[in-house]
Amino acid sequence: MTEPRHLRLTRRAALAWAAALAGAAHAQPAGNKPYRIIVAFGPGSFNDIAARELARFMGETLGHPMIVENRPGAGGSVGTEVVVKAPPDGATIGLGTSSQMVMNVALYRNLPFDVDKDLRLIGLVGRTPLLLAGKASGPKTLKELIAYARANPGQVSYGSGGTGSISHIVGEAFERAAGIKLTHVPYKGNGPALADLSGGHVDLVFDGLATSRPLAEQGRVHLLAISGAQRNPAAPDLPTFAEQGVRDYDAYSWNCLMAPAATPPEMIARLNQTLNQALTQPAIKERFAQAGVDILGPSTPEQADAFGQRERARWVPFVRSLKLDVN
């Protein structure tokens, strides 16, 4: 099968990567200390779930414990800075998200780091279409919600993973696409936002299937729409935004693993190999499929870096056009 265009390597890059792989088998973090994955959002989100699944398999392959450390704050910037400032020995890596790698670049003019210069992507993980979940007592269809919101500007609230997070950005974009005005309520992660949605304290949350569907099955929230050109195989009964009249609207997040830019190439290579192996594990593939997540690997660091650059070229101008106040 032909390799996807966005994951093709130049001959020079392929040769360079082969050389890095040759030394990867012997790469170890300084002092054989445990690895840690920094998650820039709180427990309960798919980011956290994915990191813990990867940590389990990658730790076994690497022969060292791999722990997950949640460092939420500032839409993911706090966790990103932890990775940037970590010793570049491969022991501290991060689960990068589209919030950290794209949205924050557009939102914050004075970030204490440069994602292109201070980080090296290890590899791509997955792409998650986002859905809109509503409180159980709220409108049961997207059209009903939009009609109510138009008749009651600012009276419908939506929780997010924090100001500038992906669940905030897609909420702002949804307002524009649907021609409505909502009230944004930021939390430190989508987990707490979902908890308040379940309790009826906010009206809406943009989220992924992995964390919102169990609540829907319990009758605590109602799923209204999901992003994508077609219905997601993991939720065939859930209509898309487009088929309910909200066209030209695409809400998704994506993940990668990242490390400080100065991390030795042989360590990046070993971590990349281990990540790609983990993504082939049946348990991880099944977990991602159940969550409606498309696995983006296997990939090389070069391919992951190029993917991030394309996403920034696509989304940064749009996000800046929203003129959000995140200060």
Image (spheres, rainbow, N blue to C red):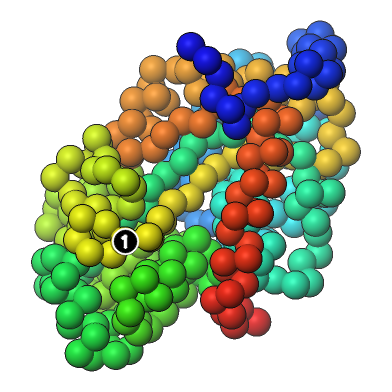
Q: In this view, does 295 lie to the left or right of 135?
A: right
Identity of the residue drawn at 75% across and 57% down? 81
Quadrant of residue 155 in the image?
Answer: bottom left
Give the residue drawn at x 40%, y 56%: 250
The location of residue 71, given as percent across then percent down, is: 62, 56
Q: Name the residue rendered at 31%, 61% in the picture.
A: 247
Q: Could you tell me residue 188's position as x and y percent?
A: 50, 67
The answer to whether residue 26 shows anywhere in this view is no
Q: Where is residue 266 in the image (x, y as percent from the top left)?
A: 82, 21
- Total label count? 1
Seen in the picture, residue 44 relative to 245 is either above or below; the reply is: above
Q: Which residue carries the number 1 mark?
A: 247
Three-letter residue code for mark 1: Arg
Residue 289 appears in view? yes
Looking at the rendered image, the quarter that the C terminus falls into is bottom right
Q: How crowded is mark 1: few (under 14 residues within 10 Å), some or many (20 or more)?
A: few
- Position of residue 153 measured from the top left corner of the image (x, y, whole percent): 29, 90
Q: Is mark 1 on a helix, strand or loop?
A: loop
Q: Quadrant of the rendered structure where residue 308 is?
A: top right
Q: Which of 67 and 266 is in front in this view?
A: 266
Report whether 235 appears left or right of 249.
left
Q: Residue at x 23, y 48 (%)?
A: 214
Q: Nearer the viewer, residue 57 or 115?
A: 115
Q: In the displayed structure, would residue 244 be above or below residue 93? A: below
Asked if 324 appears above or below 187 in the picture, the reply is below
Would you place residue 306 above or below residue 144 in this image?
A: above
